[in-house]
Each structure stands twice: as C-alpha cells, then as structure tokens.
Image (tube, rainbow, N blue to C red):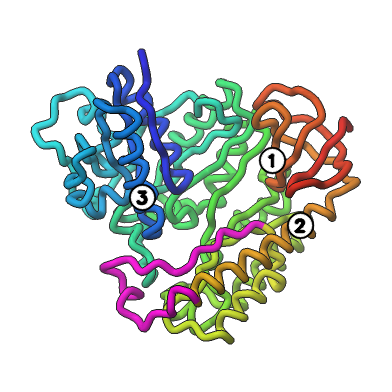
C-alpha cells in the first residue's frame, strides 16, 4: 500500500511522528503531508513556501498540514487555497483522522487538555540509519520566548514498558542506534506512577534491551539532569558521549528575562562535571542571539560560553518574536544587530567545531554508516568513509585527515 509523501520541519519528535503518519495514512492516494514547526517565524515561512511549491509541482495533490504551526494558528493555514485539510498535533496521530471522511477540513482540538501520549509503535525510519523514539511530549514551563507549549500541550511521559517495546522492535528491524526524544525530555516521569527520573528510565531501558549498541539523547535542560543520569554518563559505554543542551544564552540577566531556570555558572559547572565523569564528552547547545534588551556586553557573555563550556555543535537562532509570548512585548534588539550577533556566534561555533575535528586526526573511531561513504562517530562527528559499508553498520576506522568540515577515515 502506497505511503503519502511527508515534508517534515523542525525537531526529532516531528520526525518520529511523521513515521507514525506514514503508516496511518497509507493508501491515501496523491496526498502530501506537511508536518510544520513553530519555533521561529522562519520555520513557519519555510512551511508555507513548501506548501505553495508542492501545489505548483503536484497539481491536484491533496495537501494536509499539521504540526506545531498548524496547532497554534490553524486558521492561517486553512486560509491557504492550496491546503485541503488542517490537523492538530493530537488529531494527526488518531487513525480516524486518516480513515474516516472529515466533517470539517480543520480538525484541531484543545492541546492543553491532553493527558496522554500517542501509543503507536513503528518499525523503521525509511532510509535513516538511526531511529528516533518519543519518550515525552509537551512542556509545563513558560520560557518567555517560546510558543511551543501551546503547540504541544502539558508535559506527559511514555511508560517505560512502551519505550522498551518500541526500542526492541527497532533493534529487531536492524537499527543500531536509537535517539530518545521529547519536548522537555528531562521532565520525564513526573506524571507517571512513582515519578521515575529520566536517568532511571534510561538505566532500565539499557538493561531491558541489552542488544542495543548505541543510545543517544536529544536536547536536555541543563537544570534538570538527575543524579542517575549523571552516573550513567560516567559508567555506560552504550550511552553516546554527545549531549545537546538547551542553554539559550550565557548572560544571567538574559537568562532571567527568558525565564530559564539555570544560571551561566550552572551551565559551566554541569559541563565540567560531565567531562570529569567522561572526559571525551562533546557538547552541543541552542543559543539565541539578540534576545530583547540584550546589550553588547550580554552578547559577549553568550559568545564566551562557547569556550567556557567547550561547546562544539551549535544551533544558533536570531531571536524571533512569537506573538502571544512575553518576549514579544519586551524592548526589541534591531534585526540587523540580531543577525550580526548570530553570525558571530556561528563563526565562533564553526571554529570550535573545526578545532575539535582537528583533534580527532590520528584517532580511531566507531562510525555508524548513514549512507554509502558517510557516517558519524559516537561523538556525532561527520566522517567520509573510504569503502562501501551498508547503512546501519557500525565500523571501526582510523581518522586520517580532515576536509570540508568532515573527518576522512581509512580502515582501522
């Protein structure tokens, strides 16, 4: 049965949900699903652009729009003449949305009343070599810049047994690496019986699925990393030594105005403590440039965070005012200044990343092959491979050089 075409924007959770929809919507002839993101204005603009391009290239195709942007502002997408249906983030995972004739082309419920996660199991991720698994959804915090809680609803966790079942199913399908993902993943377990922490869940998962070679964690809130997870970082080789932290800024006043719950010192201390337990750990981070009221001195504090935390993989965003958020009502930094500060952060991040890659020349690495001639190390560094290996294999290589932002490998 033919699967619909799906255009996925945004986070790994969206990627996981797109795979669920691929199964639920099987048999929907000439349908294109656009799974949107709302984290920035640019993400929404790209989704609208993709909708218009799809309508031009696929005349007659039924375009169904869903995801966070559709959940937050369904009327805007429904008003586009190219769009046939709009589904909310809950409705897109409901089998009835894909099997029953809709009474209304717009089906978007109140996400804030949702109390459970979707219980779907999937067998694969198309051509991907690694698989994403949802362990948590939603967020109970209200950072002043963020609209995502209104697209995802309250925090809710997937029970441990369901996670283990999903991971085991993916391993049996041939996946060698699984990435756990969520909206606020370190909030895991607060709504479950016994309130298990994220670290407790990860420990039990690794014990329950011993045949899983590599487990990776997606974005973590620096203030919520629990003692069990800290212990695992230093003791569990199957937990990958690459962590992405939701830091957002490196200035205490800006962090306070963002309504973040950590300080600059907290971030620096956390990175140092994890490296003490596992010295080869590398860190990525989200950073926002030009948050309202940010001065040049505050921006430099964020810039220095790259060195102080030893960050190597950066996701940098110029501040994007989201209507309905407190930050949108604060005194704004001029757009050209935001872009300039973002460019400065990206340049510093690129230099740090290159230094890290240079430090790996001469080392050996275990690489997950993603496609012919390319893979990634345990530290998520990109590697150009010298020989053909099947996607999904984990191979040992020696790093012989560096070119165009990629490590160059030879057989170990």
In the rendered image, the vertical position of residue 160 relative to residue 61, given as above or below: below
Query: Would you call the spot at circle 3 few (<14 residues within 10 Å), some (14-19), or many (20 or more)?
Result: many
Q: In which quarter of the image is residue 392?
A: top right
Is residue 343 toward the left or the right of residue 236 in the image?
Answer: left
Tell me the CA gap for discs 1 and 2.
26 Å
Is residue 160 toward the left or the right of residue 23 in the image?
Answer: right
Quick one: label 3 or label 1, which is nearer the N terminus? 3
Give the number of the disc on residue 238.
1
Under circle 1, the secondary element is loop
Q: Furthest-left residue in view?
A: 103
Q: Does the magenta stretch include residue 161?
A: no
Under circle 2, the secondary element is helix
Mark 2, residue position: 354
Q: What stretch is highlighted in magenta?
A: 313-336
Marks 2 and 3 in Cβ contact (< 8 Å): no
Tell me the CA gap for discs 2 and 3.
38 Å
Where's the C terminus, which quadrant?
top right
Marks 1 and 2 in Cβ contact (< 8 Å): no
Residues 353 and 221: in front is: 353
Mark 3, residue position: 156
Residue at (49, 38) in percent of width and height: 133
Is residue 336 toward the left or the right of residue 270 in the image?
Answer: left
In percent of width and height, residue 6 lies at 38, 32
Q: In which quarter of the image is residue 285?
A: bottom right
Q: Can residue 226 be seen in this view?
A: no
In the rendered image, the vertical position of residue 23 relative to residue 148, given as above or below: above
Residue at (44, 27) in percent of width and height: 122
Is residue 304 toward the left or the right of residue 64 in the image?
Answer: right
């Amino acid at each position: 049965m033919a699967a619909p075409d799906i255009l996925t924007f945004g986070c790994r959770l969206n990627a996981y949900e797109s795979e669920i929809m691929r199964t639920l919507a099987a048999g929907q002839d000439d349908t294109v699903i656009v799974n949107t993101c709302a984290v920035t204005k640019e993400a929404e603009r790209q989704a609208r652009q993709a909708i218009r391009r799809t309508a031009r290239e696929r005349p007659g195709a039924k375009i169904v729009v869903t995801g966070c942007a559709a959940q937050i502002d369904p009327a805007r997408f429904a008003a586009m003449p190219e769009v046939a249906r709009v589904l909310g983030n809950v409705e897109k995972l409901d089998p009835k949305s894909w099997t029953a004739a809709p009474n209304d082309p717009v089906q978007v419920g109140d996400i804030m009343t949702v109390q459970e996660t979707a219980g779907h199991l999937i067998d694969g991720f198309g051509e991907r070599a690694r698989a994403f698994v949802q362990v948590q959804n939603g967020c109970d915090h209200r950072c002043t810049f963020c609209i995502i809680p209104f697209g995802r609803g309250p925090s809710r966790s997937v029970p441990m047994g369901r996670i283990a079942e999903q991971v085991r199913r993916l391993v049996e399908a041939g996946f060698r690496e699984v990435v756990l993902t969520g909206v606020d993943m370190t909030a895991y377990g607060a709504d479950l019986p016994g309130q298990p922490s994220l670290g407790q869940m990860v420990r039990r998962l690794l014990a329950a699925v011993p045949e899983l070679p590599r487990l990776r964690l997606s974005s973590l809130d620096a203030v919520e990393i629990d003692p069990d997870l800290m212990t695992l970082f230093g003791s569990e080789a199957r937990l990958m030594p690459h962590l992405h932290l939701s830091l957002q800024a490196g200035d205490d006043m800006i962090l306070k105005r963002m309504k973040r719950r950590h300080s600059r010192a907290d971030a620096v201390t956390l990175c140092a403590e994890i490296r003490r337990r596992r010295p080869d750990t590398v860190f990525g981070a989200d950073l926002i440039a030009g948050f309202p009221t940010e001065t040049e001195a505050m921006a430099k504090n964020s810039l220095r965070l790259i060195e102080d935390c030893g960050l190597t993989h950066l996701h940098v965003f110029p501040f994007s005012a989201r209507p309905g958020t407190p930050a949108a009502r604060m005194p704004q930094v001029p757009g050209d200044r935001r872009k300039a500060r973002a460019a400065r952060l990206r340049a510093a991040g690129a230099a740090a990343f290159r230094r890290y890659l240079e430090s790996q020349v001469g080392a050996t690495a275990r690489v997950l092959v993603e496609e012919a001639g390319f893979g990634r190390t345990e530290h998520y560094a990109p590697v150009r491979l010298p020989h053909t290996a099947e996607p999904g294999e984990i191979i040992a290589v020696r790093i012989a050089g560096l070119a165009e932002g990629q490590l160059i490998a030879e057989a170990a």
